Image: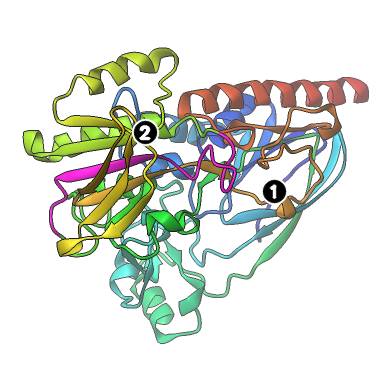
Amino acid sequence: MTDVVATNQTIIVVGGGISGMTAALEAAETGKQVILIEKRPYLGGRVSQLYKYFPKMCHPTCGQEINQRRIKMNPNLTVLTMAEVSSISGETGNYSVTVKVTPRYVNENCTACGECSKAVETEFDDEFNYNLGKRKGAYIPNKMAFPQQYVIDSAIIGTDEATAAKDACKYDAIDLDMQEETLELAAGAIIWSTGWKPYDANKIQAYAYDRLDNVITNVEFERLMDPHGPTQGKLLRPSDGKEAKNVAFIQCAGSRDRNHLAHCSRICCMASLKQSNYVEEKYGDEGKSTIYYIDIRAIDRFEDFYKKVQANPNVKFIKSKVAKIEGGENGNPVLHGVDTEGYHRYATEHDLVVLATGMEPSVDVSEFPVDLVLNMEGFIEPDEKNGGIFAAGTSSDALDVNRSVQHATASALRAVQVVNQVAKAEA
């Protein structure tokens, strides 16, 4: 049974990505009691699924491990994974939050030794790798997962494999009798940090994502590059496993389009500029990248990064909104469109096409457990009607990592002010 103590001076943070971890830590380090709720089995969110950050080009462990260490050391912070908020009622300073906790079937005795996984054969699509690979029915979500505990997939509960996994554990860490729990928690303020999801590329019919194996999204490209990803860091085409040395990047795939996402997602241009470095990293001068763009939005400090990529002879820029993608010979996607600088038509083959899909809120408008003021894209507006509930990071807008962290810090300070007022009123 999960034992969590919460009062109207507790701050609840919903979502354990980079913004949620930041908000929870900043609030907890002021001395406030904080509960961090994450629906996945681990903290880290989509940042943990990246290969590298821009513009420093460092791995997500740069930053993530610091947050994890701060979480371990802070007694004011309680973390609930595989937990999801189902309802919120009340008012500023006096909220009641209902949380559903899904069983992990693994307890805190787990040492991440991996013996349970060796005893299991059944495989499932690997969500962490955007289903590009497989994982076992007993698995640890990723190398950086926090907590470092295995998960037993509910699909094998009640089977001989679950029993085999339990028998293989020397530490009595597997509890196949775990049940779903419902917790009722009090809170004075709530920080909503449920993050973003990539726009569904299947909806962009002209780009044939649903029909051509060698058309992938920018988030999938990150997983292909990661040494812990489905190809062990080799840049290989999904269709035949061949090296992808001639890569096309299509900007605004679904963004700035009244038929899809009306807004600019801000990160897409920088993501493609960054990923063009990946191609050269793997293949040197043999690696060629072509960026098809409407315009490049590299604001503030990112301008220098953009200029550096522009100067790279292995990267070509074509100012064009690609009209359609068709299948060519040997599985090569063929891009069709008009280059607006010269106004000539092209039909160009590439080994691999990467769609720079935009960002949208991870929680659908109809699925919020409480009424909040949202804009037309589903992001949470900073409105007094939201009371003591504050958005953090990409729940508020399309933001990069740096701006998400800054925004989360500001949200934490607002939540702290609310519970300070509660404490003062009760003194």
Q: Position of residue 364 (x, y in %)?
A: 66, 51
Label 2 sits on a secondary structure element that is strand
Per the image, the residue denoted by label 2 is 293
Mark 2 crowdedness (10 Å alpha carbons): few <14, some 14-19, many ≥20: many
Q: CA distance from mark 1 to mark 2?
A: 50 Å
Q: Position of residue 52 (x, y in %)?
A: 31, 34
How would you classify the magenta stretch by its main secondary structure? loop
Q: Name the amino acid, label 1.
A: Val
Identified at 46% across, 78% down, the residue is: 156
Per the image, the residue denoted by label 1 is 4
User: Residue 348 vs residue 162: left or right?
Assistant: left
Is 401 part of what is drawn in magenta?
no
* Residue 228 visible (yes or no): no
Q: Nearer the viewer, mark 1 or mark 2?
A: 2
Identified at 56% across, 52% down, the residue is: 81
* Residue 25, image quadrant: top right
Label 1 sits on a secondary structure element that is loop
Q: Position of residue 169 (x, y in %)?
A: 36, 69
User: Residue 226 vs residue 170: left or right?
Assistant: left
* Quarter of the image where the N terminus is located: bottom right
Residue 292 in the image: above or below residue 203:
above
Q: Position of residue 299 (x, y in %)?
A: 44, 17
User: Residue 396 vs residue 105: left or right?
Assistant: right
Residue in front for this viewpoint, 52 or 420: 52
Residue 192 in the image: above or below residue 303:
below
Q: What are the residue bounds of the magenta stretch?
A: 242-263
Identified at 60% across, 63% down, the residue is: 102
Q: Name the amino acid, label 2.
A: Tyr
Q: Earlier in the sequence, mark 1 or mark 2?
A: 1
Residue in front for this viewpoint, 88 or 341: 341
Q: Residue furthest bottom?
A: 160
